[in-house]
């Protein structure tokens, strides 16, 4: 019984030793395979990276493929920037004009308010009563009288000048009417003389053309009488 127990123990010990050695051997083989696969992957990655980075490779192809759209996009941004600059200038110009108009409107509003005040003040009888009643210094009173007198003289001169112009217009119109009436009288006298000559020539009693008989008509004397 003792011997059989020792044999079993020895067998179990051998089996355990052999199983541990087999496990270690398998794990060593797995590690070598994994290391080999890692080396292969590293080499493949190096080859792939070299293919990507070389001239005319994948990187250059991607750059070339994206270069034209990027260039077009850059040109579009440049054109947009120029348009924005133009519009910015126009907006600034319009803002400047609006500011000028606002200042002018403010000036007009101020002047309008000032003129309204002057008009309302000039139409206020109470204000003029106070102005007329207030006492000025002798120097200002003398100047005030001089200004009033000069204003009255200027008004009188303007009235006289207007009368003079009216008289000139009336004289000119009368002279024009007189000349027109004189022209009408001369024309009627000439017409009358022509009719008399024609009548005398038709009856044969009138003087011949160019003769100067004592009883002949003398148109010059009539014109000379008219002129006198």
Image (cartoon, rainbow, N blue to C red):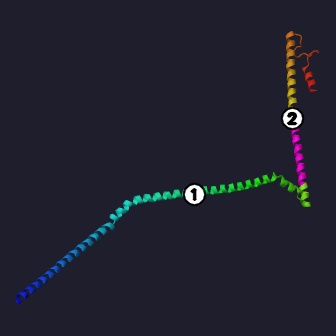
**In the displayed structure, would residue 168 be above or below residue 224?**
below
Q: Quadrant of residue 189?
A: top right
Secondary structure beneath label 2: helix
Q: Which residue is drawn at 87% across and 45% down?
A: 158
Q: How crowded is mark 2: few (under 14 residues within 10 Å), some or many (20 or more)?
A: few
What residue span does the magenta drawing correspond to? 146-168
Kindly indicate whether the residue at mark 1 contacts the one at mark 2 (C-beta within 8 angstroms).
no
Residue at the disc numbered 2: 172
Task: Answer left or right for 40 relative to 176.
Answer: left
- Which residue occupies the extreme right position in the image? 214
Q: Residues within 10 Å of mark 1 (few under 14, many from 20)?
A: few
**In the displayed structure, would residue 54 be above or below residue 24?**
above
Q: Can residue 163 be seen in this view?
A: yes
Residue 162, percent from left and from top: 87, 42
Q: Can residue 56 be seen in this view?
A: no
Residue at the disc numbered 1: 89
**In the displayed structure, would residue 176 be above or below residue 115?**
above
Q: Residue at x 38, y 60 (%)?
A: 66
């Amino acid at each position: 019984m003792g011997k059989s127990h020792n044999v079993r123990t020895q067998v179990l010990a051998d089996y355990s030793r052999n199983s541990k050695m087999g496990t270690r051997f398998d794990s060593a083989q797995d590690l070598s395979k994994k290391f080999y696969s890692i080396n292969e992957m590293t080499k493949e990655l190096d080859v792939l990276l070299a293919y990507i980075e070389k001239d005319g490779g994948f990187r250059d192809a991607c750059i070339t493929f994206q270069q034209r759209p990027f260039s077009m996009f850059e040109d579009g941004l440049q054109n947009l920037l120029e348009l924005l600059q133009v519009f910015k200038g126009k907006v600034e110009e319009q803002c400047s004009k609006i500011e000028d108009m606002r200042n002018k409107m403010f000036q007009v509003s101020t002047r309008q308010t000032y003129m309204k005040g002057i008009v309302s003040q000039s139409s206020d009888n109470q204000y003029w009563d106070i102005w007329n009643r207030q006492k000025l210094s002798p120097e200002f009173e003398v100047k005030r009288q001089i200004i009033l007198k000069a204003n009255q003289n200027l008004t009188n001169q303007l009235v006289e000048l207007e009368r003079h112009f009216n008289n000139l217009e009336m004289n000119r119109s009368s002279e024009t009417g007189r000349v027109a009436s004189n022209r009408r009288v001369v024309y009627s006298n000439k017409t009358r003389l022509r009719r008399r000559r024609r009548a005398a020539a038709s009856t044969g009693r009138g003087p011949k053309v160019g003769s100067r008989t004592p009883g002949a008509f003398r148109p010059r004397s009539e014109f000379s009488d008219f002129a006198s």
